[in-house]
Image (cartoon, rainbow, N blue to C red):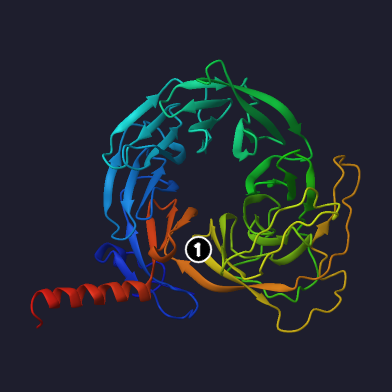
């Protein structure tokens, strides 16, 4: 496990003296061997948004939005204007004079929306006195529009003109939104997914939003909503329901109900950092690459293959606390072909993929970021007893509570998730992270801090190159 170079995790004094720390080499596959701690927020940091290849923005409960350079850790801009906590952030690219320009959209509990220029730090536009706080933002790049979701859904253009809005939703409001083909939007509202269609009227300067369908297959609140590709999207609920939907006709293609029961001893080793506790069922976050969907289920991880409709790998206890975010990293490229129309029927080819998968990153309320690698089991898989997959329940569940969950025995997982990196630096729950590939990984936490996790070998090469360059300029030693 990676620790501070000067001692254990509690050694916070080292952070004050040196903002760039070197982490031990106990995990040879983990490239993140250096970290840089960024300070600037005075409360929980909940949001990170990538602006371009070198910059990102952070927003938190202090109402501040800060712009940072990921290479140097320099604070570039401090955006002040919100009086309460930030509730949503998004990057919004718009046509510029010479090249596209990226602005920042922010929403706050003070019921305001703002657009910022991250180059200058100026607030370009703002709207106040909204009917409710905005919980999520969705940018529609091809239409040059963006949508705010709360107790109502509002459609805006790049000039901050309100084009249209929906009626008042339930107190739960819109928790998440994804863009679908043919100018449609899927919005998660409590247990339902509401499908809206945007259409232009008159001189195409105005828009109309129309509700066209309500998907009511979930039995509990929807916590995660993602786009898989042009023809599929997925949702996950508080009680572990994972549904894959067709993006064109909005029919369910795959339905899985993930249940963590109390099974017999599993042959797959668990990561145990503390006392045992019952895992929650809730799907907090999902991610997809190619035919794979990964779900954060309580403190566990679950990877599902859409093509084979089978579990690829799982780990019931991947963290000590609930997982907040996951990210799939393909090791190579996926060769995609056209998806078929119905996964469940199996009558049409869905596509072909090279299984050069895969690493997975996860962050948790336990304060750690972990890196996992999908590996083949060392021995050929053999028929498993019911106890091996007793923790899983597959098949479509009845929406009536009186009917028991249908359990279908599934083939055993053919892969295992192996921990190859454990990034420990935060003293509070990690809220999210963003990946800048070679330039590093950025995480934010309830400890008010932001950490840039850096590739130690790359940083060493850059320092050596800089040193040789200076020597060359000075004519050597």
Q: Position of residue 145 (x, y in %)?
A: 50, 31
**Taking the image as drawn, is residue 130 in sight?**
no
Please tell me whether residue 298 is drawn above or below residue 380 in the rendered image. Answer: above
* Residue 375 vs residue 246, the one in the foreground: 246
**Quadrant assignment, res 275:** bottom right
- Specify whether 78 is left or right of 217: left
Front residue (pair 270, 284): 284
Question: Is residue 302 depicted above or below 76 in this figure?
Answer: below
Q: Position of residue 201 (x, y in %)?
A: 58, 18
Residue pushed farthest top?
202
Q: Decide if residue 429 is on the left or right side of residue 230.
A: left
Q: Position of residue 77 (x, y in %)?
A: 27, 44
To which residue does mark 1 refer? 369
How far across and down, in percent of the image, does residue 52 sit?
A: 38, 51
| Side of 79 relative to 366 (left or right) | left
Who's the residue at 44% across and 32% down the image? Answer: 108
């Amino acid at each position: 496990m990676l620790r501070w170079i000067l001692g254990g995790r509690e050694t916070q004094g080292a952070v004050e003296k040196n903002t760039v720390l070197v982490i031990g080499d106990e995990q040879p596959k983990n490239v993140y061997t250096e970290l840089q701690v960024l300070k600037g927020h005075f409360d929980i940091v909940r949001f990170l948004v990538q602006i371009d290849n070198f910059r990102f923005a952070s927003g938190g409960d202090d109402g501040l939005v800060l712009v940072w350079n990921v290479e140097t850790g320099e604070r570039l801009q401090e955006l002040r204007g919100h009086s309460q906590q930030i509730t949503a952030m998004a990057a919004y690219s718009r046509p510029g004079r010479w090249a596209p320009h990226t602005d920042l959209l922010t929403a706050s509990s003070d019921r305001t929306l703002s657009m910022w220029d991250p180059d200058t730090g100026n607030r370009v536009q703002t709207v106040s006195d909204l009917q409710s706080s905005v919980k999520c933002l969705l940018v529609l790049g091809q239409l040059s529009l963006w949508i705010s979701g709360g107790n109502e859904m509002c459609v805006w253009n790049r000039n901050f003109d309100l084009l249209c809005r929906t009626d008042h939703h339930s107190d739960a409001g819109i928790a998440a939104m994804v863009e679908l083909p043919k100018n449609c939007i899927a919005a998660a509202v409590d247990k339902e997914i509401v499908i809206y269609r945007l259409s232009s009227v008159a001189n195409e300067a105005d828009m109309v939003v129309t509700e066209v369908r309500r998907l009511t297959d979930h039995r509990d609140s929807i916590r995660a909503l993602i786009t898989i590709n042009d023809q599929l999207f997925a949702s996950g609920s508080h009680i572990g329901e994972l549904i894959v939907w067709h993006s064109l006709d909005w029919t369910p293609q795959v339905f899985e109900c993930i249940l963590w029961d109390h099974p017999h001893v599993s042959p797959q080793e668990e990561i145990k950092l503390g006392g045992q506790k019952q895992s929650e069922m809730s799907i907090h976050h999902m991610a997809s690459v190619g035919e794979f969907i990964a779900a954060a289920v309580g403190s566990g991880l679950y990877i599902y293959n859409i093509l084979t409709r089978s579990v690829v790998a799982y780990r019931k206890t991947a963290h000590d606390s609930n997982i907040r975010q996951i990210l799939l990293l393909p090791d190579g490229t996926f060769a995609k072909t056209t998806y078929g129309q119905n996964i469940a029927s199996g009558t049409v080819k869905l596509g072909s993929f090279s299984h050069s998968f895969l690493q997975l990153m996860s962050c948790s309320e336990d304060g750690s970021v972990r890196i996992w690698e999908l590996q083949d089991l060392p021995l050929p898989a053999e028929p498993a007893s019911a106890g091996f997959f007793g923790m899983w329940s597959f098949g479509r569940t009845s929406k009536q509570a009186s009917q028991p969950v249908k359990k279908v025995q599934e083939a055993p997982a053919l892969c295992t998730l192996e921990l190859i990196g454990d990034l420990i630096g935060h003293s509070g729950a990690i809220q999210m992270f963003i990946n800048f590939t070679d330039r590093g990984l950025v995480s934010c936490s309830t400890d008010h801090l932001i950490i840039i996790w850096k590739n130690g070998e790359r940083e060493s090469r850059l320092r050596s190159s800089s040193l040789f360059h200076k020597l060359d300029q000075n004519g050597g030693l």
